[in-house]
Amino acid sequence: MKSTTLMISVTAILIFGGVIAYTIRSNSDNQIDTALQNEAMMEKTETEAPEEAAMMKEEVVTDEAMMESTSRYTVFSPEALASVTTPRTVLYFYANWCPTCKVANEDFTDNDSEIPTDLSVIRVNYADTDTDEAEKALAKKYGITYQHTFVQIDDKGNEITKWNGGGIEELVANIK
């Protein structure tokens, strides 16, 4: 009787140990598979990134060319801001990854003639791959914490009003 109980106990311990070893081995294999899949995705992303960057750069060049043809909606540069001659100026803090910013950008570009003639809208890159130090300084100066923010300024650069979101209709409704 004792030997039967001992035999059953040893068999149970071996089976239990085998189940634990199998579970550990399976989890280890799954972790290795997951790591290999993640590595493959990273390599794919790294090879695709230059293509995406080129497409984004192409979009920016197209946007800049379209905006240079108009005096009411322009891309920020210190020179563009300094050369504003209209009585009213609005800075539009835009991010190239922001879907609503892209829609508004298209609205301003396509419907430039609907922007009041006494107003200049200057698109300032904010927290994206195109943002430079001068744009970061403007965002800091006006306390910008969110893309798709508009700031109307006076001729000395003082803030008159600020709002978030919208296209030309909201621009016209919010300017002072």
Image (tube, rainbow, N blue to C red):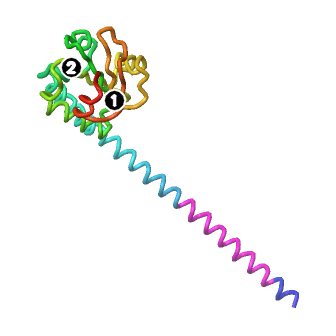
On screen, 22 above or below 173?
below
The residue stretch that appears in magenta: 7-29
The numbered dot on residue 119 is 2
SS label for mark 2: strand
Quarter holding the C terminus is top left
At which x and y percent is residue 86? 20, 13
At which x and y percent is residue 111? 14, 32
Q: How many C-alpha atoms fall within 10 Å of the one at disc 1: few (<14), some, or many (≥20)? A: few
At which x and y percent is residue 96? 30, 33
Residue 149 in the figure: left or right of residue 121: right
Residue type at the position of mark 1: Thr
* Pointer 1 residue: 129
Q: Residue at x 43, y 54 (%)?
A: 37
Q: Tell us which disc is closer to us: 1 or 2.
A: 2
Residue type at the position of mark 2: Leu
Where on the picture, by quarter, is residue 99?
top left
Where on the picture, by quarter, is residue 74?
top left
Quarter holding the N terminus is bottom right
